[in-house]
């Protein structure tokens, strides 16, 4: 369903004085070439109706990251899209649905998660979200955001004719996208679906079934972790996003507290579109119909 009555916008989360300087330095430090990407396999996927390439590239962690790249068969490519994923990872292949069918799309697997498995970063969600959280320099989400920039560079190197680059990410990928996009002016439009990591001071008050619960429990034991989380707040980052963004949020969501999803939407500094779903991260009777209606609007947004 489209936007009806909205919750009152919360006061923005407290922002570190050097928030922007930290992220600009991160962009400079962790997006430097070479990427050393390599295609491992090519094939046609009849389910997708697209050509698929499986590739690896140098992750910001210094390890190898995995991605699928898909593109229309027999067509000249002038558009591109980075498509991120939820915290379950992307173990089985590229998403069946993503907007802009004419675009070449890269589906990167975040550091430490399935297909980009790491000997140092745990793949279990509740452990991954805490990895390196003692310091802003070592926190895993810093490297996850940087791999969005790096995967975009791989896509643009693979298809140098791309004139427009967009972003699509849900849950984990929505929040990581919000952290990454302010510092990369190559992106034209974006969609955040049930975005996570928004307004930590509010979301940490809400028990949940997602990765936020592990963070909430860690903060209860180690309150000083809040100082690190302030640098990885998707709502703070959203205040720097000025490109058009379509945000799909849920009225109810056991995994990603809706208060954080709405906080990201309200914080966006540029043109924005809100689409409200009855629920997220859970089945419900009207789910298919609501997503179909949303996807029609999303297709028009990405034209």
Image: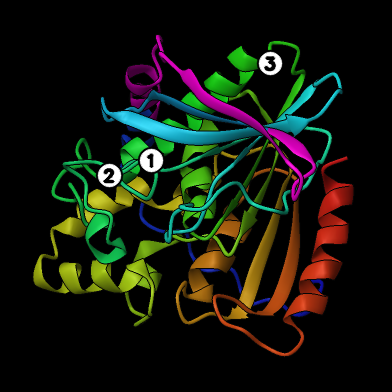
Regarding mark 1 in the picture, which secondary structure is present there? Answer: helix
Q: Which residue is mark 2?
A: 140
Q: Do the residues under discs 2 and 3 have CB atoms within 8 angstroms?
A: no
Q: Residue 201 appears at what percent x and percent y? A: 34, 67
Q: Residue at x 56, y 48 (%)?
A: 93
Above or below residue 206? Residue 91 is above
Q: Residue at 52% x, 44% y: name it.
A: 177
Residue 144 numbered mark, or none: 1
Separation of disc 1 and disc 3 at Cα?
Answer: 23 Å
User: Disc 1 vs disc 3: which is toward the camera?
Assistant: 3
For the N terminus, give its image quadrant: bottom right
Q: What crowding class fits label 1: few (fewer than 14 Cα within 10 Å), some (14-19), or many (20 or more)?
A: many
Q: Looking at the image, which residue is at 42% across and 38% down?
A: 145
Q: Secondary structure at mark 3?
A: loop
Q: Name above or below for residue 256 compared with residue 19.
A: below
- Circle 3: is it few (<14), some (14-19), or many (20+) Cα within 10 Å? some
Identify the image quadrant of residue 22: top left
Q: Which mark is residue 41?
A: none
Task: Give the mark, 1 or 3, whose residue is nearer the N terminus.
Answer: 1
Q: From mark 2 to mark 1, how far is it between C-alphas?
A: 6 Å
User: Of label 2 and label 3, which has the lower sequence position?
Assistant: 2
Residue matched to label 3: 159
Q: Is residue 76 above or below residue 49?
A: above
Out of 233 and 107, give the one closest to the viewer. Answer: 107
**Element type at mark 2:** helix
Residue 214: within the magenta?
no
Residue 146 horizontal/vertical position (percent): 40, 31
């Amino acid at each position: 369903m489209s936007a009806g009555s909205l919750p009152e916008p919360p006061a923005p989360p407290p922002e570190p004085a050097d928030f922007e300087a930290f992220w600009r330095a991160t962009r400079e430090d962790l997006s430097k070439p070479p990427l050393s990407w390599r295609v491992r396999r090519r094939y046609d996927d009849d389910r997708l109706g697209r050509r698929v390439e499986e590739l690896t590239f140098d992750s910001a962690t210094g390890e190898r990251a995995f991605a699928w790249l898909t593109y229309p068969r027999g067509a000249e490519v002038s558009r591109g899209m980075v498509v991120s994923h939820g915290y379950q990872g992307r173990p089985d292949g590229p998403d069946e649905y993503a907007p802009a069918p004419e675009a070449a799309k890269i589906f990167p697997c975040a550091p430490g998660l399935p297909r980009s498995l790491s000997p140092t970063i745990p793949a279990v969600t509740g452990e991954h979200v805490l990895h390196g959280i003692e310091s802003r320099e070592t926190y895993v989400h810093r490297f996850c955001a940087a791999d969005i920039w790096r995967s975009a560079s791989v896509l643009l190197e693979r298809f140098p004719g791309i004139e427009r680059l967009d972003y699509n990410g849900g849950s984990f990928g929505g929040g990581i996208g919000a952290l990454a996009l302010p510092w990369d002016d190559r992106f034209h439009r974006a969609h955040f679906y049930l975005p996570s990591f928004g307004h930590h001071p509010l979301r940490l008050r809400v028990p949940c079934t997602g990765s936020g619960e592990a963070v909430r429990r860690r903060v209860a034991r180690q309150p000083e972790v809040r100082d690190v989380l302030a640098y990885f707040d998707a709502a703070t980052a959203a205040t720097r996003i000025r490109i058009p963004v379509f945000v799909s949020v849920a009225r109810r969501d056991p995994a990603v507290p809706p208060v954080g999803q709405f906080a990201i939407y309200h914080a966006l500094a540029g043109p924005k579109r809100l689409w409200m779903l009855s629920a997220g991260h859970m089945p419900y009777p009207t789910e298919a119909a609501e997503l179909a209606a949303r996807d029609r609007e999303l297709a028009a947004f990405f034209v």
